[in-house]
C-alpha cells in the first residue's frame, strides 16, 4: 500500500500558537483526545484562549519534562503559519525538540527554522506531503467493504466518528482499519494520505490507494474531509465519495451551527440534503451506497439536553443518531451490520 508513514518521538507537546477559536485547533485537540497518555502538555502564546486541558509548558519546561516533539496543533485558513509563531518554534527546535506540522507550508521554509533545527539537531517533519506517483482513479470495483464519514461542514466530527467506528468494529471482532486522510488522523494512526494536498486529478486515485482491495468481511473506515456544500472544500469530499466507493456513510453534524464555519454567507445544509447529494455522487462507483447513521457533535450542548437532541435527529432521519464521544457508536454499527446482512 503506497502510504506515507509518519513517525515521531514521544512524549510530545502540542503548540497552539495564539489562536482563539477551537475550530482551528482540531489537530491539537484530536491528538490530546486520542493520544493523551503520550502528551506532556501544551505550548501557548499569550493571546491564545484555546485550552486542551493539559499542563501549560514553556520550551524549557517541556525539555526538562522529557518532551521530544512539538506538534503544531493549530492552523489558520489556508494552512499557513503566522509570523508571530516562528520565534517560539525556532526556540523549540534550537532546544533539540523535533517539530511536526500538518500544514500546507513546509517547515523548512519558515525564516530561521531550518538553521535552528540544525543547531539543535532536531527534525522538521511535514505530515501534509502526499505520496509520489499517485494514479488517476479507475472507478473499478474492489473487494472488501468501506464506510466513509461525510460532514455537513468542516470540523464537525468526521475524524472522531471514523476512529470510534473502527474501534467499535474491532472490539466486536470484525476486521477493520481506520484510514486517515488528514493531518491529525495521520498523526494518530501513524499512516495515511493527506487528501487535501493531492493534485485534483489524482484525488480519486489516492482514495483507491488508501483503501485497496481487501478480504470480503473487512471494513475500511475512511476519515472524511471537507463538506459537499462547502464553497471552498467540497472537492475533497467528492473525490473521497467516488474513489472510496463506500458501501455506507455516516453524516456528521454540529447541531448548534447555522452557517458554514468561516463562510457566514452560506447556510448549513440539512442532513437530508447531505444524504441526498452524497448518495447521488457516491452511486457513480457504488450504486449500493447508503447512509447508515448520524453522528452529532454535542460537546457544546448541555448534558441534560443531549438525549432529547439525539432522539429528535433520529426521529427526523429514521436513522440511529449518536455522539461518538459521549455515548459511543454502537447503534450505528448495529444498523450498519443489519443493513449489510439484509
Image (tube, rainbow, N blue to C red):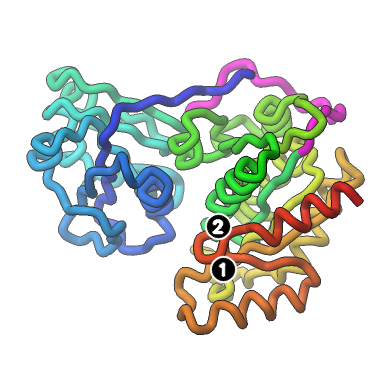
46 or 331: nearer the eye? 331
Q: Is residue 70 left or right of residue 242?
A: left
Mark sitting earlier along the chain (1/2): 2
Q: Does 88 appear above or below 316? A: above
| Marks 1 & 2, CB-CB < 8 Å contact | yes
- Residue at figure coordinates x 86%, y 29% from the top left: 141
Task: Name the residue beneath numbered marker 1.
Answer: 254
Q: Magenta stretch: residue 140 in it?
A: yes
Badge 2 crowding class, 10 Å Cα cut-off, few under 14, some 14 to 19, many 20 or more, is many
280 or 61: nearer the eye? 61
327 or 26: nearer the eye? 327
Across and down, in percent, residue 61 comes to: 9, 42
- Residue at figure coordinates x 76%, y 77% from the top left: 316
Quarter occupied by the N terminus: top right
Say whether residue 201 is visible: no
Say whether residue 185 is visible: yes
Q: Does 57 appear above or below 323? A: above
Across and down, in percent, residue 300 comes to: 45, 73
Q: Magenta stretch: residue 131 in it?
A: yes
Which type of secondary structure does the marked residue at label 2 adopt? Answer: loop
Task: Name the residue beneath numbered marker 2.
Answer: 157
Q: Does 213 appear above or below 186? A: above
Across and down, in percent, residue 73 comes to: 34, 46
Across and down, in percent, residue 106 comes to: 37, 30
- Residue at figure coordinates x 84%, y 30% from the top left: 139
Magenta span: chief secondary structure: loop
Q: Which residues are magenta?
A: 129-145
83 or 281: nearer the eye? 281
Rendered image quadrant of residue 219:
top right
How many numbered discs sit on the rendered protein?
A: 2
Amino acid at each position: 500500500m503506497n502510504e506515507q508513514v509518519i513517525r515521531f518521538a514521544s512524549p510530545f507537546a502540542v503548540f497552539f500558537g495564539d489562536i482563539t477559536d477551537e475550530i482551528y485547533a482540531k489537530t491539537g485537540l484530536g491528538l490530546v483526545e486520542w493520544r493523551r497518555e503520550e502528551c506532556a502538555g501544551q505550548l501557548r502564546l499569550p493571546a491564545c484562549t484555546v485550552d486542551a486541558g493539559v499542563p501549560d509548558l514553556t520550551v524549557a519546561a517541556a525539555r526538562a519534562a522529557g518532551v521530544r516533539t512539538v506538534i503544531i496543533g493549530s492552523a489558520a485558513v489556508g494552512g499557513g503559519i503566522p509570523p508571530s509563531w516562528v520565534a517560539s518554534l525556532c526556540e523549540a527546535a534550537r532546544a533539540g525538540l523535533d517539530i511536526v506540522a500538518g500544514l500546507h507550508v513546509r517547515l523548512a521554509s519558515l525564516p530561521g527554522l531550518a538553521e535552528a533545527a540544525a543547531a539543535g539537531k532536531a527534525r522538521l517533519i511535514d505530515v501534509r506531503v502526499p505520496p509520489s506517483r499517485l494514479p488517476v482513479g479507475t472507478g473499478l470495483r474492489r473487494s472488501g467493504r468501506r464506510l466513509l464519514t461525510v460532514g455537513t461542514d468542516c470540523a464537525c466530527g468526521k475524524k472522531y466518528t471514523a476512529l470510534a467506528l473502527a474501534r467499535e468494529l474491532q472490539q466486536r471482532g470484525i476486521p477493520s482499519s481506520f484510514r486517515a486522510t488528514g493531518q491529525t488522523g495521520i498523526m494518530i494512526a501513524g499512516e495515511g494520505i493527506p487528501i487535501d494536498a493531492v493534485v485534483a486529478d489524482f484525488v480519486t486515485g489516492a482514495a483507491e490507494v488508501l483503501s485497496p482491495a481487501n478480504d470480503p468481511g473487512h471494513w475500511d473506515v475512511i476519515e472524511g474531509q471537507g463538506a459537499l456544500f462547502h464553497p471552498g472544500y467540497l472537492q475533497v469530499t467528492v473525490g473521497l465519495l467516488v474513489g472510496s466507493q463506500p458501501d455506507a456513510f455516516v453524516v456528521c453534524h454540529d447541531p448548534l451551527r447555522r452557517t458554514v464555519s468561516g463562510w457566514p454567507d452560506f447556510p448549513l445544509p440539512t442532513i437530508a440534503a447531505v444524504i441526498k447529494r452524497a448518495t447521488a455522487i457516491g452511486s457513480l462507483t457504488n450504486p449500493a451506497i447508503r447512509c447508515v447513521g448520524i453522528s452529532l457533535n454535542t460537546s457544546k450542548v448541555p448534558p441534560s439536553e443531549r438525549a432529547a437532541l439525539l432522539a429528535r435527529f433520529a426521529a427526523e432521519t429514521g436513522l440511529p443518531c449518536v455522539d461518538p464521544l459521549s455515548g459511543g457508536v454502537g447503534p450505528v454499527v448495529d444498523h450498519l451490520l443489519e443493513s449489510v446482512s439484509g
